[in-house]
Amino acid sequence: MNDKLFKLQNILKVKQSEKDVIQSEYQEAIEQFEMEGKQLYSLLKRKEDLEESIHNRISTRIKVEQLMQQQYFVTNLEKSLLIQQRKVSHARAFMNLKAEKLKEQAVECKKYEKLVQNHTNMLQEKAKKLDIQFLDELSILQFTHQPNR
């Protein structure tokens, strides 16, 4: 019986170490998502500032060449934004996948924790029954060997 408990505990240790690995992968995915999100925010901020600058220059008169150059920058910035939005979406999907794997692994660990706990409880119950049986036999022996009978 103790051999089975030992095996269950070893499996639980393996499952927990797998969970730890998945947890670190999930943390890395979160960091990647945050980094991509910050880059997207930075690009959006640059686009907003550039558009505001164009708007201000238009009201104060601007040369057509400068306006075309500014518009070219905006177009390139919009292309960069689309690429960055794809990266953010990919990072989000990857992060969600890792979160799901972590959740599954946590459930798996809980199952083995429960098995170990149930097996430990069963062994404790058996030990209690053996103790009670031993005490009963001891009392019967003492009763049968009493000289005042």
Image (spheres, grey):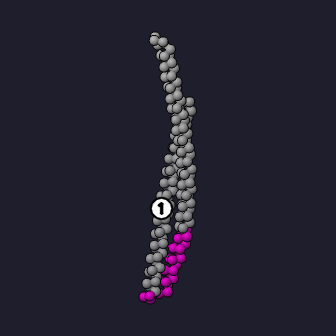
- Element class at badge 1: helix
Indicate whether 127 appears above or below 85. above
Residue 109, given in percent of the width and then of the height, sits at 54, 44
* Residue hosting label 1: 34
| Residue at image point 51% right, 32% down | 124
Indicate whether 55 appears above or below 116. below
Quadrant of the image for the N terminus?
A: top right
Looking at numbered disc 1 in the image, what kind of residue is underneath it? Answer: Glu
| Residue at image point 52% right, 35% down | 121
Residue 54, given in percent of the width and then of the height, sits at 46, 82
Does the segment drawn in magenta span residue 43?
no
Residue 35, given in percent of the width and then of the height, sits at 47, 62
| Residue at image point 49% right, 22% down | 135
Residue 134 in sight from this viewpoint: no
Magenta-tinted stretch? 59-83
Q: Nearer the viewer, residue 102 or 1?
A: 1
Give the residue furthest to the front.
149
